[in-house]
Image (spheres, helix red, strand yellow):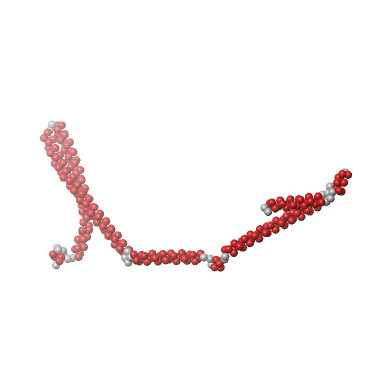
Amino acid sequence: MWSYFFGGSGNSNDFSKTSSKNKDLPKKAIIELREHINLLTKKQTHLQTQILNQSNEAKTFLNKGNKIMAKNSLKKRKIYENQLGKIDSQIYSLEQQLFSIESANLNLETMKAMKQGSMAMKSIHKGLNIDKVDETMDEIRDQVELNEEISEAISRPVLTSMNDIDEDELDEELDMLASESVQQNVERSKGRVHDMVEESARDNNNAVELPNVPSNKIAQQATTESNEPAQEESEDEDERALRELQAEMGL
């Protein structure tokens, strides 16, 4: 009954066919408009050629002195020019209409694409809300913190007793070891000095004796001098060697 008042048949198949036709109507109109514009463009080119030909014929008849035929050629040219003006207007109107339909169809396709995008976003965000997103982000942060704690626990030394060592005690032991090392170096230096003194004494004892010179003065001087100057000279050499060794050691 309602379909009767609104002029419909009440058949769903008819409605689907109508919607399909309406969907294809813009494309069909665009194709027909382009074809008609091409046809009018060809007619426009033909009329332009005819106008040029009539102008040439009028000039030819004038050169021959035939004014009547020249006027007829000019009349034909006027007719062609009027037709050309109408065709130009028609082409302009069709081009404007074609542009409007193409623009409208482009807007329609754009809206369809945007609608598809909107439906896709709704499908993606279905079941999601800001609370669930915040909850997921909090879980991610908790897992990251847990991972850092695990890494720190793994990197700590296995022997915990190593962490209980007092650093001050270690420093004191190092100082004691350093003092012992210095004392040992001093003792070694003293031993070396003592060895050098003994070696120098042995060299003095093993000195080569020179032959006696047949001189009364030298023999008399040799008998009167005591052994103390020789011993003092030996002691002076030992002390000098000891001082040189101490200078080298910085003592």
Is residue 30 among what the camera can see? Answer: no
5 or 53: which is nearer to us? Answer: 5
Answer with left or right where residue 251 lies relative to residue 149.
right
Number of labels in the image equals 0
Picture coordinates of residue 87, whole percent (x, y):
17, 45
In the picture, residue 185 is in which quadrant? bottom right
Which residue is at 57% across, 63% downward? 167
Q: Nearer the viewer, residue 68 or 44?
A: 44
Q: Residue at x 16, y 34 (%)?
A: 59
Q: Quadrant of the N terminus?
A: bottom left
Coordinates of residue 227 in the picture (x, y in percent): 83, 51
Q: Is residue 137 visible?
A: yes
Residue drawn at 12 percent across, 33 percent down? 66
Vertical position of residue 103 compared to residue 85: above or below = below
Horizontally, residue 69 falls left or right of residue 160, namely left
Residue 57 vs 249, above or below: the answer is: above
Q: Position of residue 60 (x, y in %)?
A: 16, 34
Where residue 220 sits: x, y (%)?
87, 46
Q: Nearer the viewer, residue 184 or 59?
A: 184
State the quadrant of the C terminus. bottom right
Q: Quadrant of residue 165?
A: bottom right
Q: Nearer the viewer, residue 5 or 35?
A: 5
Q: Identify the residue at image location x=16%, y=45%.
A: 86
Is 196 on the left or on the right of 170, as rendered? Answer: right
- Residue extending farthest to the left is 68
